[in-house]
Image (spheres, helix red, strand yellow):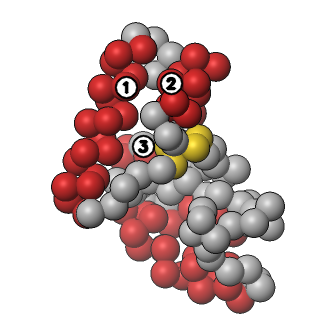
Amino acid sequence: MPDLTDEQVKTEVMDLHTAIYQKFGYEMKYIRPPKGEFSERTINITNGLGYKTVMWSFAYDDWNEDKQGREEYAKKKILDNVHPGAVILLHGNSKDNTNILDYCIKEIKNMGYEFKSLDEFQK
């Protein structure tokens, strides 16, 4: 987003907001900058649109569709990086994530953690 003009940032965000609302009836209030790329200017723009920026505390190269078929690797990466307050970024295009998500959720709960929405999360 840092390479976009102010108007392009606003259009990108609001077009997404509209699409999410039309498809799911959900009013977005959080935003994760694509690729984690942001600037003070883009944060100010999205804040001005009413969004709170939320970054992740852990991600791995699951987005790369050429690097699938590594389910044990993915389990280890995810489970080794769980910590209190973790925000784990998993990409929906990953077949590995689809195959291991149930296992990882159960293991994380077995580790004593719980899952909460951002609205429920307390620092």
- How packed mark 2 is, by other alpha carbons closer than 10 Å (few <14, some 14-19, many 20 or more), is some
Q: CA distance from mark 3 to mark 1?
A: 28 Å
Residue 40 position in % (x across, y down): 64, 19
**Residue drawn at 50 percent across, 40 percent down:** 50
**SS for dot 1:** helix
Left or right: 94 in relation to 82: left
Q: Position of residue 45 (x, y in %)?
A: 50, 24
Q: Is residue 67 above or below residue 83?
A: above
- Tell me the residue that label 2 is attached to: 45
| Disc marking residue 64 | 3
The foreground one among 106 and 113 is: 113
Q: Image quarter for residue 105?
A: bottom right
Q: Which residue is mark 1?
A: 10
Name the amino acid type tagged 3: Asn
Mark 1 or mark 2: whose residue is earlier in sequence: 1
How far across and down, in percent of the image, does residue 69 sit?
42, 60
Q: Give the Cα separation between the discs numbered 1 and 2.
A: 7 Å
Q: In front: mark 2 or mark 3?
A: 2
Question: Hey, what amino acid is under mark 1?
Answer: Lys
Left or right: residue 1 versus residue 25 is right
